[in-house]
Image (cartoon, rainbow, N blue to C red):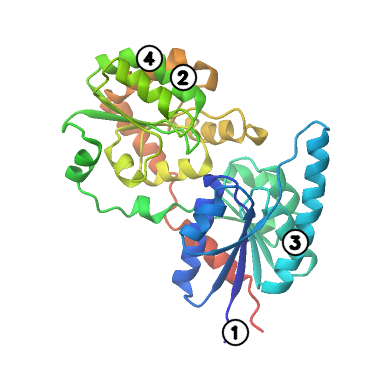
Amino acid sequence: MKKKKIIISGGGTGGHIFPAIAVAQALQRIDETVEILFVGAKGKIEERKVPEAGFKIELLDIRGFQRKLSFETLKNIFRLIKSLFKARKIIRKFKPDVVVGVGGYASGPVVYVASLKGIPTLIQEQNSYPGITNKILSKRADKICIAYDAVIKYFPENKVVLTGNPVRKKITDTVATREEVLTFFNLEAGKKVILSLGGSGGAKSINDGIIANLDKIVQSDVFFIWQTGKNYYEDSLKATQEIQAKNIKVYDFIARMDLAYKAADLVISRAGAGTISELSMLEKATILVPSPNVAEDHQTKNAMALVDLNAAVLIKDNETEDKLIDTALELVKNSDEINQLSNNISKEKMPNSGMLIAKEILNLIIEK
């Protein structure tokens, strides 16, 4: 039997690339002979994370378009044209049976070229509101995998299948004990724990909200695990050292997110689709602070999909200094509300997303 060959294209953020890697791993579990090639954007997270996961990757020199005309916009048009030619070359050489787009700049040229060549294509939309790339590609794609019912109306309904977002197995399948968690973070048994996340780069408004209220955290009987992101680590660490905040654990990046999630009674986070899927799978009570600096304000739409179900609390980006820590410290001690949020967000989880998407991809392959 002919070996199946699949291209997975896209990335740009962890929210795009981690689910893509989970799909690739699911494909390998179904058929260990399948050959997978990633195509991503040069200088983005996929350039590092895909090889770390054991997959090959080709890179396109492509960027997002600004909304105003400038010299950079003209350069990006040239990059897009160049990327279309490179995508064509990659497809001609690799000869994929299916091409998958997971969102992000690199998915556009690859899925578009594949559709012109008559190669079956599938796109995955992680958010509750589609990005511009997937809106355009949806007209040409053969299948569209979505994570939220709310997004069906933006796509041709006959192509859509609800699959949820795949989640990294190393986060959901941890066998860590409570003792291991306490030791790793140097926590005290019996104390409530708040975990604050801002992505690998960090979230300025979340960090500003914490720094403005460090004294309240220090005076509370709560442990606070704070992932600042690399851009804010030095200033955040210095601020906690100056007030000798022993109950605040500061990290630029947390390698063992499985332990961090397991430690947390309450999570503070941006509202990226991948993170929300992890929080749903792990049934975590959450305060969401949507980033306003994303296309189509999709993080607010992601957050509201949960808030409307009483499955998360929302704090606006410009209200973090006034409301975030007060809300978190009050909420973490309210066991009834924590349990209700946990229970409601758990109803949104789809545990077999990676396998569902992998099966849809393989169903598009026509045996020759």
Residue pointed to by mark 1: 2
Neighbor class of circle 4 (other Cα within 10 Å; few <14, some 14-19, many 20+) is some
Asked if one can make out residue 144 in the rendered structure from this viewpoint, the answer is no
Three-letter amino acid code at the position of disc 2:
Asp
Task: Of the two numbered discs 3 and 4 on the same chain, state the one appearing first in sequence.
Answer: 3
Instruction: Quote the CA–CA distance across marks 4 and 2.
Output: 9 Å
Identify which residue is drawn at 25% across, 37% down: 185
For residue 169, what is the image quadrant? Answer: bottom left
Q: Quadrant of the N terminus?
A: bottom right
Residue pointed to by mark 4: 213
Neighbor class of circle 2 (other Cα within 10 Å; few <14, some 14-19, many 20+) is some
Residue pointed to by mark 3: 86
Label 4 vs label 1, nearer the camera:
4
Three-letter amino acid code at the position of disc 3:
Lys
Q: Quadrant of the C terminus?
A: bottom right
Instruction: Quote the CA–CA distance across marks 4 and 1.
Output: 61 Å
Task: Of the two numbered discs 4 and 1 on the same chain, state the one appearing first in sequence.
Answer: 1
Residue 312 rendering spot, x and y as whole percentages: 43, 31
Label 3 vs label 4, nearer the camera:
3
- Mark 3: secondary structure: helix
Task: Of the two numbered discs 2 and 1 on the same chain, state the one appearing first in sequence.
Answer: 1
Neighbor class of circle 3 (other Cα within 10 Å; few <14, some 14-19, many 20+) is some
- Mark 4: secondary structure: loop
Identify which residue is drawn at 17% across, 31% down: 188
Task: Of the two numbered discs 3 and 2 on the same chain, state the one appearing first in sequence.
Answer: 3
Residue pointed to by mark 2: 208
Three-letter amino acid code at the position of disc 1:
Lys
For residue 240, what is the image quadrant? Answer: top left
